Image: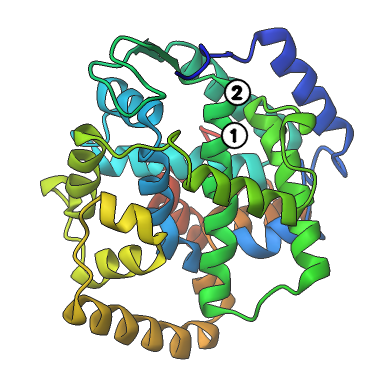
Amino acid sequence: MREPPKPVGTDDFERCLAQAAAQSPGDVEGVFGPASAIWLVDREAALFLGAGRALLMQLAHPWVATAIGEHSAVLADPIGRFHRTFGIMFTLVFGSLPQALAAARNLHRRHAGVHGALPEALGPRHPAGSAYRANDEAALMWVHATLTDTALLAYELVLPPLGAVARERYYGECRRLGLLFGIPVEAQPPDWNSFCRYRDTTLASPELVVGPAAREIAGSVLAGAGRLPVPRWFGDVTAFLLPDRLRGDFGLAWGETEQRRAKRALRLIRRTYPLLPRRLRHVGPHQEAQARLAGRLRPDLWTRSLNRLWIGRPAMEKGR
């Protein structure tokens, strides 16, 4: 049986934020700044290729799946959920320091209200009626790990690999991002190899169990929740990127047809994506951050339009 939730308290959370702020290159630059590896990776629109993988890996944790099923509007409002999720993440990475800290505090407050009990047993670690909390440190660590791992995987699907030194720097910055979730650095794996061992150990453990709620949410999201036209190749690429165990547990089709479709889509994307101009490749919040560094406080029309696509509003800071 799993240990009871260990929620991140407000005082501990604020200590994490103070540590992240102390490592910031400046208020205008934000938590990371333009010289960071995380800006290099997260600015690429190609990271959306991994969105399905990251979500399904998160859903494999019973606490996450139950919390999303009981407290999220992902099925009723998939576009809004997409905008809120990317709005928070891009603000943490590309926002000014005050913007990033404010987004982190809003996320922490939102998570603090998400708790309950599992309606059914899901493996030996998760009996029926056991408590869950969205601000549990271990659950936050798994969600953070899926984002860290998937972002780099999606980046290297279509662009040259970072290399060992840059990958280690990227992971070190992701540990700082973990602080914005309230995860102390000592609770995170200390280096990339340790992180990979943590990921693989968790994937093989009874901590992850794909239950009926997780499969229902995953199937609905990959079908656009009945509201969005999701191309079949996106589901096939998601199946390709998932670890074998989770692909099977979610019941994703992975026959010859799906494999051919995924390979064909990735071949086309790998050939064309690097040729796109940066104004198309780089997400709106990154372009807004670059304008901020140049002293332009209001994003231009193109950036505002891209922001509406990615985060549902014209700028990371509401009202601009």
The reply to whether residue 83 is visible in this rendering is yes
In contact (CB < 8 Å): disc 2 and disc 1: yes
Q: Is residue 73 above or below residue 191?
A: above
Residue receiving disc 1: 141
The residue sitting at 79% across, 59% down in the picture is 168
Amino acid type indicated by mark 1: Met
The residue sitting at 35% across, 47% down in the picture is 56
124 and 62: which is toward the camera? 124
- Mark 1 residue crowding within 10 angstroms, few (<14) / some (14–19) / many (20+): many
Amino acid type indicated by mark 2: Glu
Rendered location of residue 311, percent (x, y): 44, 45
Say how the picture is coloured.
Answer: rainbow
Q: Is residue 163 above or below residue 171?
A: below
Residue receiving disc 2: 137
Quarter that holds the C terminus: top right
Quarter that holds the N terminus: top left
- Mark 2 residue crowding within 10 angstroms, few (<14) / some (14–19) / many (20+): some
Rendered location of residue 119, percent (x, y): 23, 16
Rendered location of residue 98, percent (x, y): 72, 30
Residue 209's quadrant in the figure?
A: top left
Number of marks in the image?
2
Left or right: residue 83 compared with residue 190: left
